[in-house]
Amino acid sequence: MSGKINIRRDTNDQFYRYKMPRLQGKIEGKGNGIKTVLPNIVEVSRALSRPPAYATKYFGSELGAQTKIEEKNDKYIVNGAHEVAKLQDLLYNFIDKFVLCGDCKNPETDLIITKEQTIVRHCMACGKRTDVDMKHRLSTFIVKNPPPKDKKGGQHASASATSAAGANDSSSDGHDNADNDEFDMLASDTAMLALNGAAAAAAADADDDGWEVDLDMSAEAVAARQKKLGVNTSLLKDDDDEDDARSGDKDPYDELGDFISANKSASDRAIFDKASELDLEKKHRALVVVVMCLFDNPATIVGDIAKRDKLLMAFGDSDKHQRAVIGGFERVIEADMDKLLAKTPIIFKALFDEEIVDEDAFVEWGKKPSKKYVDKDVAKQIHKAAQPFLRWLEEADEESEDEE
Ligand SMILES: [Zn+2]
């Protein structure tokens, strides 16, 4: 009876990407002291990116019952005996009113308290701001107890970003690779190595500025090469990878691409081992191959990012690595502009929520369209499509500055 259910009650689609645990309720005590404990409201609220107190207060308000909240002990209680089915129903009402975008019904929204002390839902997917019913008693509570503004911690955790709420909770975050724990360690070790090696790498790669437009690569040449090869790896060794040139041998990037394409469900570990075998385990450009080969299903792309976060961080987290991840996704978007261009903000937000690409890297990328990974026209379109996300990053920043 537990398990995950869709956040939107009006869809039964099992592939709907936004899920939450089914709400639990436990009736305790008797007589006047009878109460309903909400043992998993924290997990449910995390899936909704809302503080658990909000849904609890909403129940109390709708049921005319007192609530008891001890945040430190994760205790959320509604006085009286209440059927869990009724509470689940109320939870859906809460989601309609305080979570889903009023326009497109996407649940990736933030609650923003305006200067006029009203609450709006700011939607990541469509960028719109829709009002919240200020007459509801919960609205008063929210104005007095605004959502946390820490981007990494609370409010901005996406529906899929199960890891966002507990940094130390990575072993139970729902990822399904059996060798996950081991891989956690591997990923952080590699990150450390990448940090330690950063200075040396910077010297070795002096000819690759990592950010600037490659002026010596004409857009036509890029486009022609991209059309010729499905998953194009020829661009990957255009400057700083001379050391990879093993004449006669098969290109290691091609080999990695072939391996992943033939083993799409391979574990993070298996893919990373293959990359290591090919001496690509620290190469930022290997990430472009990984992204292009793994994220080729537009229907599941955003959820897939959460499943593969550790792999995407295992190669290193330098500016160049992060830019390569963005570049890989630029190419994925380019390959299916009809379906994916509009999803650009959600894809980027997933990369941000999973801490694969950080704010600085996105801000740098956002300064101007670059044809480093895609042709200029495509770069411009993706840049434009990403604006809601870039604005959101900026606003989240301003809000935290306001507080200081
Ligand atoms: Zn929307």
Image (tube, rainbow, N blue to C red):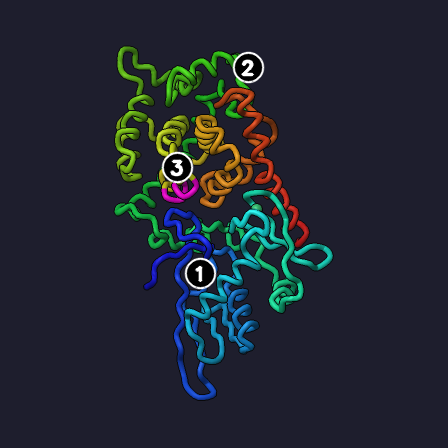
Q: Residues at badges 1 and 3 in contact (C-beta under 8 Å)?
A: no
Q: Residues within 10 Å of mark 1 (few under 14, many from 20)?
A: many
Task: Look at the numbered disc 2 and give the secondary structure of its residue.
Answer: loop
- Left-right relation of 309 to 135: left
Residue drawn 32% across the image and 26% down it: 257
* Residue 108, position as x, y percentages in the image: 52, 49
Q: Which residue is mark 1?
A: 44
Amino acid at pointer 3: Leu
**Earlier along the polypeptide chain: callout 2 or callout 3?**
2
Q: What separation in Å lies between label 1 and label 3 (alpha carbons)?
A: 27 Å
- Left-right relation of 343 to 189: right
**Residue 303 on the magenta span:** yes
Q: Quadrant of residue 309?
A: top left
Q: What separation in Å lies between label 1 and label 2 (alpha carbons)?
A: 50 Å
**Earlier along the polypeptide chain: callout 1 or callout 2?**
1
In the picture, the disc for residue 339 is none
**Earlier along the polypeptide chain: callout 1 or callout 3?**
1
**Residue 318 on the magenta span:** no
Q: Which residues are magenta?
A: 302-307
Q: Nearer the viewer, residue 22 or 286?
A: 22
* Residue 342, position as x, y percentages in the image: 53, 35
Q: Quadrant of residue 267?
A: top left
Placement of 240 over or under 314, stated as above or below? above
Amino acid at pointer 2: Leu
Residue drawn 49% across the image and 56% down it: 48
Q: Nearer the viewer, residue 347 or 368?
A: 347
Q: Which residue is mark 3?
A: 312
Q: Quadrant of residue 131?
A: bottom right
Q: Which residue is mark 2?
A: 215
Instruction: Residue 131: tell me if it is visible.
Output: yes
Task: Look at the numbered disc 3 and give the secondary structure of its residue.
Answer: helix
